Amino acid sequence: MMTKIILETDNKKDILKIKELADRLKIKYRIQDYVTSGKSRKSTLKYYKIIDKGVDVSNYGDPSHWQKTVRKDRNNITLS
C-alpha cells in the first residue's frame, strides 16, 4: 500500500529540510511549484474547508435498497 502526503509551504528553508529528511528516509517525493493569486488561494482554501467538513449521508437512505432497485435485472445480491 502506498500513502501520499501533501505538504504546502512558502518557506524555502522548510522545503530543504523536508527534502533532506525524505532523502535520508529514502522516500520518493515530487516538488511542484505553483503560483496562485490571493483570490484563487482563498477560493482553494474555501474548498479544502468544505472537503474537510465532510458530508452528512444519513439522508441518502439505505444503499442496499438502492442497489437492489438498480440491479433488478441481476440475480439477487447479498451484501455482507
Image (cartoon, helix red, strand yellow):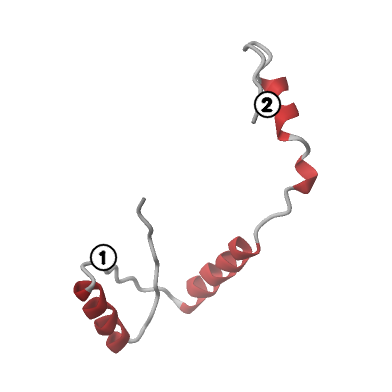
Relative height, residue 38 to residue 56 (above, below): below
In this rendering, position of residue 11 left or right of residue 58: left
Residue 62 point in image, percent of width and height: 76, 35
- Residue that badge 1 annotates: 30
Task: Tell me the residue that label 2 is attached to.
Answer: 67
**Eye-nearest disc, 1 or 2:** 2
Identified at 71% across, 30% down, the residue is 64
Q: Position of residue 20 (x, y in %)?
A: 22, 80
Report the residue at 49% width, 74% height from top. 41
**Outermost residue, front side:** 80
Q: CA distance from mark 1 to mark 2?
A: 40 Å
Query: Mark 2: which secondary structure?
Result: helix
Which badge, 1 or 2, is on the more N-terminal residue? 1
Q: In this rendering, is residue 76 above or below 63?
A: above
Q: Tell which of 41 and 3 is nearer to you.
A: 3
Identify residue type, mark 2: Gln
Please tell me in which quadrant of the rendered image residue 5 appears: bottom left
